[in-house]
Image (tube, rainbow, N blue to C red):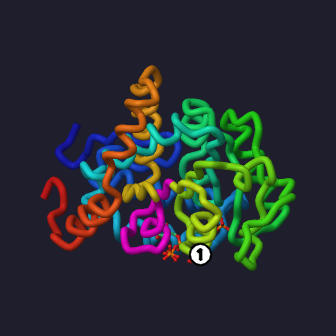
Amino acid sequence: MTEYESVPSAVDDETEIPTDHPRYQDLLTRHRIEAGVEKGITHLQGMHAEGRGSAFDYLLGEETIPSADDAERAAAAQLLLADHPVISVNGNVAALVPGEVVDLASTVNAAIEINLFNRTPERMERIADHLRDHGAEDVLGLDADARIPELDHERSKVDAEGIYEADVVVVPLEDGDRAEALSEMGKTEIVVDLNPLSRSPQVAAIPIVDNIIRAFPNTTEHARALADADDATLREIVDSFDRAEALAAAEDRIRSGDLAGE
Ligand SMILES: Nc1ncnc2c1ncn2[C@@H]1O[C@H](COP(=O)(O)OP(=O)(O)OP(=O)(O)O)[C@@H](O)[C@H]1O
Ligand SMILES: CC(C)(COP(=O)(O)O)[C@@H](O)C(=O)O
Ligand code: BAL
């Protein structure tokens, strides 16, 4: 080997991104959104939403901060306590974490429902097929036989047996209007959003300020660890979670410029 030949880094089979790239996870996320757009799963505007999330993730140090881990544990406990939990899926979530949605849903016995801001029958069908390809058995959202009150838009369309009836809803990467309307309906909301100042985490009972590609697997891991816990233990975990403190901790990390590992 001459001194000019370099040893190739290990590359991700799916994306050809070098796995030792310092910002591998961010590049992978971006790649998945691009592939989602190409497959007709993700709306083009999903790239813009991704860019916003990516900027906040950079400032958080691209890691699950301790307050987010606490939120993920509280979310797992809340989901295990729920009678009728539902995970809401949009085009970004479907592209980023389809298998992880199915894993979390099966671990906490939750339903999966597609709810889109830019709703078209084609995208609904493609996302449902994509989730089924990743192991989902039932995918709700296609019937759209109920409406979220006070929300005058396509995203108000929900299934009567899904989000409409749910007691606990996981609402990732969503807009504040819908989160507020669901909260008005009395739902307990678990929001995943990298921007702690967005309205959706601000109205959530459990705001998770973390990248969904880390948040969902970690919530599932917590749920597995808590699978045998009794209701009193789960209730104690939920009650001791302080939502305002979690939001403040995320904002502090962002404002401090204290990037992990630097
Ligand atoms: N991979 C990701 N993980 C977690 N959050 C993400 C990710 N990608 C994007 N986001 C967040 O998802 C949100 C996209 O939703 P949207 O743009 O509808 O909300 P918004 O208008 O910013 O907020 P709001 O209406 O709640 O004030 C953004 O806040 C963005 O930071
Ligand atoms: C792009 C998206 C994040 C999702 O859009 P959809 O998959 O149509 O629900 C949307 O909510 C937005 O903020 O513009
Ligand atoms: N999610 C669509 C744009 C917004 O209300 O933020």
Position of 59 with respect to 35 (left or right) is: left
Total numbered labels placed on residues in the image: 1
| Residue type marked 1 | Asp
Q: Secondary structure at mark 1?
A: helix
Classify the position of the N terminus by image quarter.
top left
**x and y percentages locating residue 192 in the rendered image:** 46, 57
**Quarter residue 142 falls in:** bottom right
**x and y percentages locating residue 118 in the rendered image:** 72, 72
Position of 31 with respect to 159 (left or right) is: left
Which span of residues is magenta-colored?
190-204
**x and y percentages locating residue 32 in the rendered image:** 54, 55
Q: Which residue is mark 1?
A: 177
Q: Is residue 183 magenta?
A: no
Position of 61 with respect to 193 (left or right) is: left
Q: Residues within 10 Å of mark 1 (few under 14, many from 20)?
A: some
Q: Is residue 193 magenta?
A: yes
Task: Identify which residue is drawn at 20% across, 73% down.
Answer: 255
**Quarter residue 246 falls in:** bottom left
**x and y percentages locating residue 143 in the rendered image:** 86, 54
- Toward the top, the furthest residue is 228
Q: Residue 99: tell me if it is visible.
A: no
Q: Residue 50: tell me if it is visible.
A: yes
Answer yes or no: disc 1 within 8 Å of ligand 3.
yes
Task: Identify which residue is drawn at 64% across, 54% down.
Answer: 89
| Front residue (pair 93, 73) | 73
Classify the position of the C terminus by image quarter.
bottom left
Instruction: From this view, report whether residue 2 is shown above or below residue 227.
Output: below
